[in-house]
Amino acid sequence: MAVVAYLRVSTEKQFLENQREEITRFAEKNGMSIDKWYTETVSGSISSKERKLSGLLDKMRPGDSLIVTEISRLSRTLLEIMTILNSCIKKEVILYSTKEGYVFQNDINSKVLGFAFGLMAEIERNLISMRTKEALARRKQEGKRLGRKKGYTPKMRILAENKKELMKKRRKGTSCSELARQMGVSRTTMFRFLHHKR
């Protein structure tokens, strides 16, 4: 039965040693020996599937233990935390959170606590949705345009980024059809872009 410690920081070295000391103290106090340390620096741009934690959870077996200093170290979103907790409970991996004193395992107390987290995640999701709708309604009421500019598609954005080069080629006699082929857009899109950008 492996005992694994997981450390996560948003920036390099931020609170890393604090987490390591906290987990070491917890392990010693509970007669545990850490078999492996996983350290991860996570930015908001990294998806949950790309993280080390995802691979770590896949490798863990029933009876293994995962130790974190706080539940919030598992993820930045409550919904993702809930998914990780459920995964641990189903796999019969014991999850310890040293600061909060939580122990998640395949028992009724953990399932009740997991349900409470799930309810909180649902509330968080609804609140985010509600705030987004309210913000959009407010912008609309203020007369501000919502969404992208009319007629401004991702393809148009690519063309706009290459505007100078396209205009140069057009002046040198390259046909609209040839430019469209080179950029991977339709002749109509290229014509519309060149016509509106002149």
Image: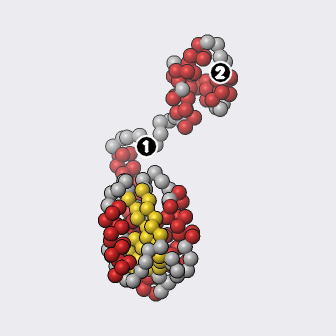
Kindly state the secondary structure of the residue where label 1 is placed.
loop
Kindly state the secondary structure of the residue where label 2 is placed.
helix
Q: Is residue 46 visible?
A: yes
Residue 159: image quadrant is top right
Task: Write the residue at 44% across / 74% down.
Answer: 34
**Residue 74 horizontal/vertical position (percent):** 43, 66
Q: Is residue 116 visible?
A: no
Task: Write the residue at 55% across / 32% down.
Answer: 158
Horizontal side of residue 174 vs 160, given as left or right: right
Q: Nearer the viewer, residue 92 or 154?
A: 92
- Residue type at tag 1: Leu
**Residue 61 horizontal/vertical position (percent):** 56, 77
Task: Assess disc 2: are there few (<14), some (14-19) or many (≥20) residues with their C-alpha within 10 Å of its C-alpha.
Answer: some
**Figure colour scheme:** secondary structure
Task: Assess disc 1: are there few (<14), some (14-19) or many (≥20) residues with their C-alpha within 10 Å of its C-alpha.
Answer: few
**Residue 168 horizontal/vertical position (percent):** 56, 16
**Residue 73 horizontal/vertical position (percent):** 39, 65
- Residue 18 vs 197, above or below: the answer is below
Which residue is identified by label 2?
Answer: 176
Q: Earlier in the sequence, mark 2 or mark 1?
A: 1
Tags 2 and 1 touching, CB below 8 Å? no
> Residue 89 has which mark?
none
Horizontal side of residue 188 vs 101, given as left or right: right
Q: Nearer the viewer, residue 46 or 38?
A: 38
The residue sitting at the bottom extreme is 108
- Residue 67 vs 184, above or below: the answer is below
Which residue is identified by label 1?
Answer: 146
- Residue type at tag 2: Cys
